Image: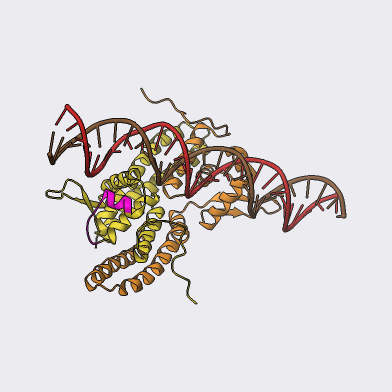
Chain colours: A orange, B yellow, C brown, D red
Amino acid sequence: MDTPPEAEILRTDKLDSLQRQVVDFFVDGVKVLGMPRSIGEIYGLLFITPEPLSLDDLVERLNISKGSASQGLRTLKGLNAIRETSGDVERRTYYQPAIELKRLVGGFIREQVRPHLDSGKSKLSSLAQAARDERDPQHREFLADRIDRLEHWMRSGSRVLPILQKLLGQ
Amino acid sequence: MDTPPEAEILRTDKLDSLQRQVVDFFVDGVKVLGMPRSIGEIYGLLFITPEPLSLDDLVERLNISKGSASQGLRTLKGLNAIRETSGDVERRTYYQPAIELKRLVGGFIREQVRPHLDSGKSKLSSLAQAARDERDPQHREFLADRIDRLEHWMRSGSRVLPILQKLLGQ
DNA sequence: CGGTTTGTTCAAACTTTTTTGAACAAAGAG
DNA sequence: CTCTTTGTTCAAAAAAGTTTGAACAAACCG
């Protein structure tokens, strides 16, 4: 009475059932965070594989292009979500996942959240100025009130981030 | 030496400069949260307009289709992000934004975050089972460890949500 | 040096998501 | 009952985002 395993779309990769499930788990996860499938696939496979993998390993096992793999690894590096193992004599670079939640959350906040908060704050400043130019006093008051509120939201956001990081630091 | 205001793509709407800026502010905001432009436009215009607006007002002022407006309002309703003013004798429905951060955050968590956390948790259960079927003891231990970690992440997430809500509740 | 391996870049192809708008439903007014 | 107003639905068009792969760069090797 349980659903049959494997009901995915055709996908000729070299993963076993459990690996596929984990990879899909991460694909969903990164999608929620607004990132592309390939990022989730790469991180997911690294996460569920004991040994470090090279770019070509990823290309072959996930059946994605070199371009995708290269770009995905770059993004993951930027997020501090992977480590490169400097293979002693090896020329090729091998990758392992960073698995401390704190580190992952930190990277995500630094790369994806803060920039938006910051640019938002600066947009708000110019907005506040524009609101002061409104001629009608009543409407001016309304605008000031709304923009105050936005500024307050942004401050709440900034205030909460470090707390969030601490709580997830564990 | 400051940048000229207005460098937007052609967009024949009926908004003044300040309104346009606020609307764009929200468009960016909802995009970060993974929602479509139209949602940000609609909420943004409601936010920066003192009087309640009807669906047709939105269509006309934002220059979007009735379909977009209808679907956007439906989503915003689901998020608890707008209120309908039951116009006494009026037939038409008018909308105002919900402006309490607590309410907005609550709606977002309920609609966009919780469902993913929940489905993630259930996927993890079946994954944990699959891991126990691994034959090689060493690899089985590795898998168990990784899946434990995932379960721990999910618990952290669940634990943090109410705190987040409280902190943003203010 | 020329050959090989490893990885990056980016325009074009492809996929996914969003928007549009015409057809339809619902409900009041006459 | 018919006309009008208000809003919804959903297939198709458009827009946005992602992936591909061929050309290129960089670095090592003999």
Q: Nearer the viewer, residue D16 or B141?
A: D16
In the rendered structure, the answer to whether residue A20 lies left or right of residue A128 reads right
Considering the image in quadrants, where does the N terminus of chain A appear?
top left
Considering the image in quadrants, where does the C terminus of chain A appear?
bottom left
- Asked if residue B51 is among those painted magenta in the image, a careful observer would answer yes
- Asked if residue B18 is among those painted magenta in the image, a careful observer would answer no
At 36% from the left and 40% from the top, the residue drawn is: B121
At 32% from the left and 74% from the top, the residue drawn is: A133
Where is A95 relative to A106, above or below?
Answer: above
Q: Which of D24 and A61 is in front in this view?
A: D24
- Quadrant of the image occupied by residue A137: bottom left
In the rendered structure, the answer to whether residue B42 lies left or right of residue D5 reads right
Q: Can residue B31 be seen in this view?
A: yes
In the rendered structure, the answer to whether residue D19 lies left or right of residue C5 reads left
Magenta part of the protein: which range?
B50-60
Q: Where is residue B1 in the image (x, y as percent from the top left)?
A: 50, 77
Q: Position of residue B50 (x, y in %)?
A: 23, 62
In the rendered structure, the answer to whether residue B170 lies left or right of residue B149 reads left
Q: Position of residue A94 (x, y in %)?
A: 62, 49
Q: Which of A92 and B109 is in front in this view?
A: B109
Q: Can residue B159 be seen in this view?
A: no
